Image (tube, rainbow, N blue to C red):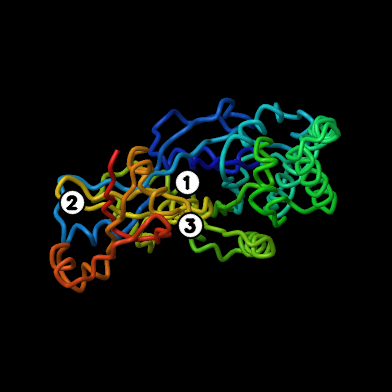
């Protein structure tokens, strides 16, 4: 699962990406399209539960969940018609699972705004409009082929035609597809199109160093816009976070304390992106390692086991499950077993966020 970082040029996308992935590349010039090919990076998802588990189980190593990020070049008005190499950039968005839009909420005369003034809601609307126009174009091109197949009696094609027409009507009402409720068969029918407004979205308000909590009018407007669409907003000062990311741990904690932060705002971004993707973590814990594994919310025990190895899913027998609360109450896995609190779950069990699991399998 991966998330693409998008936004207008010069809003701080690459600065945020570099801070998140601790990239130490050369400074980019202050002009549009300084990112051409998308950069990719891996970021750990901070999770305090890992540390809590290691208070009871002492492993040789601790491995957090990870998230793949893609830094996609700046999009401008007219991108859906090819402006600013727009078609190429939009194709990169089509390949990711979720969108992280960085929105400029700071004033700085030295940093050029592509539209001449800072207006984050207008920026959000510009991106949304370009993605909707591109989706409309994709569906219009796909519809004739689906109609031809449907006339030949193809049941899947008939469903695809119906879903395409429903999506086009929704987009014509100026509504992104993520606000359209579709069943699993309907989603599957159009999944190959990579429709961009169907992807979940997270907004990052890039704020000034004097407004780390995001209290300015720009951020408040962003929150109203996001609330109306059921999406999350995380305020971040990308410039400050980039400086913090370059420090060693001791200096990092000192700098965080000096600006009144308990943790880097990037930790909030990683967790929010994880949530936006519809992901959760379960854990395995032993003397070799304590590790967070990533599954979609709603995954069954065999599906969760398959994240570790496909053989474990194929030959799944049962899951042995306990929780961090059980560790707090009993102190060790052995004592949890002895107390009869270790749960035995079968193939239909839905793994919960925070479960600590052992999978039994045979192949």
Q: CA–CA distance between discs 2 and 3?
A: 25 Å
Q: Nearer the viewer, residue 303 or 125?
A: 303
The residue at which mark 1 appears reads as: 239
Which of pointers 2 and 1 indicates the residue nearer the eye?
A: 2
Quarter of the picture holding the C terminus? top left
List x then y, in percent, for residue 255. Answer: 33, 54
Label 1, secondary structure: give it: helix
Q: Secondary structure at mark 2?
A: loop
Q: Earlier in the sequence, mark 2 or mark 3?
A: 2
Q: Which residue position holds label 3?
A: 298
Q: Is residue 115 left or right of residue 226?
A: right
Kindly check if marks 2 and 3 are in contact, taking CB atoms under 8 A apart as contact.
no
Circle 2 sits on which residue? 286
Where on the picture, by quarter, is residue 229?
bottom right
Q: CA distance from mark 2 to mark 1?
A: 39 Å
Q: CA distance from mark 3 to mark 1?
A: 37 Å
Q: Secondary structure at mark 3?
A: loop
Q: Quadrant of residue 90?
A: top right
Whether residues under marks 3 and 1 lie with C-beta atoms below 8 angstroms apart, the answer is no
Nearest to viewer (mark 2 / mark 3):
3
Residue 297 horizontal/vertical position (percent): 48, 56
**Which mark sits nearer the N-terminus, 2 or 1?**
1
Task: Tell me what residue is drawn at x 67 percent, y 54 percent.
Answer: 183
> Which is more N-terminal, label 1 or label 3?
1
Between 172 and 250, the residue placed more toward the observer is 172
In the displayed structure, 227 sits above or below 61; it is: below
User: Residue at 65% across / 40% down in the picture?
Assistant: 191
Q: Residues within 10 Å of mark 3 (few under 14, many from 20)?
A: some
């Amino acid at each position: 699962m991966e998330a693409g970082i998008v936004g207008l040029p010069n809003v701080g996308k690459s600065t945020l990406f570099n801070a998140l992935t601790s990239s130490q590349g050369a400074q980019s010039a202050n002009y549009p399209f300084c990112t051409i090919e998308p950069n990719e990076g891996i970021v750990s998802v901070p999770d305090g539960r890992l540390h809590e588990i290691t208070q009871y189980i002492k492993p040789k190593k601790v491995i957090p969940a990870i998230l793949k990020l893609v830094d996609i070049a700046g999009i401008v008005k007219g991108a859906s018609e090819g402006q600013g190499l727009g078609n190429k950039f939009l194709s990169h968005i089509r390949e990711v699972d979720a969108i992280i839009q960085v929105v400029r909420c700071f004033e700085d005369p030295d940093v050029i705004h592509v539209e001449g003034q800072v207006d984050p809601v207008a920026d959000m609307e510009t991106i949304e409009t370009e993605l909707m126009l591109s989706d409309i174009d994709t569906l219009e091109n796909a519809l004739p082929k689906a109609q031809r197949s449907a006339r030949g009696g193809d049941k899947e094609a008939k469903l695809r035609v119906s879903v395409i027409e429903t999506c086009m009507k929704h987009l014509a009402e100026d509504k992104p597809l993520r606000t359209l409720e579709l069943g699993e068969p309907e989603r599957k029918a159009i999944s190959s199109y990579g429709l961009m407004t169907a992807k979940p979205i997270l907004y990052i308000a890039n704020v000034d160093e004097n407004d780390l909590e995001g209290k300015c009018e720009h951020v408040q407007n962003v929150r109203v816009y996001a609330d109306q669409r059921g999406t999350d907003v995380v305020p971040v000062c990308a410039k400050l976070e980039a400086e913090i990311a370059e420090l060693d741990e001791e200096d990092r904690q000192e700098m965080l304390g000096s600006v009144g932060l308990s943790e880097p705002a990037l930790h909030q971004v990683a967790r929010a992106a994880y949530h936006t993707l519809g992901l959760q973590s379960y854990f395995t814990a032993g003397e070799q390692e304590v590790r967070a594994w990533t599954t979609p919310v709603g995954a069954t025990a065999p599906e969760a086991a398959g994240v570790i190895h496909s053989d474990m899913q194929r030959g799944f027998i049962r899951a042995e499950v306990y929780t961090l609360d059980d560790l707090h109450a009993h102190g060790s896995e052995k004592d949890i077993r002895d107390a009869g609190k270790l749960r035995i779950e079968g193939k239909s069990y839905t793994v919960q966020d925070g479960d600590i699991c052992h999978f039994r399998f045979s192949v």
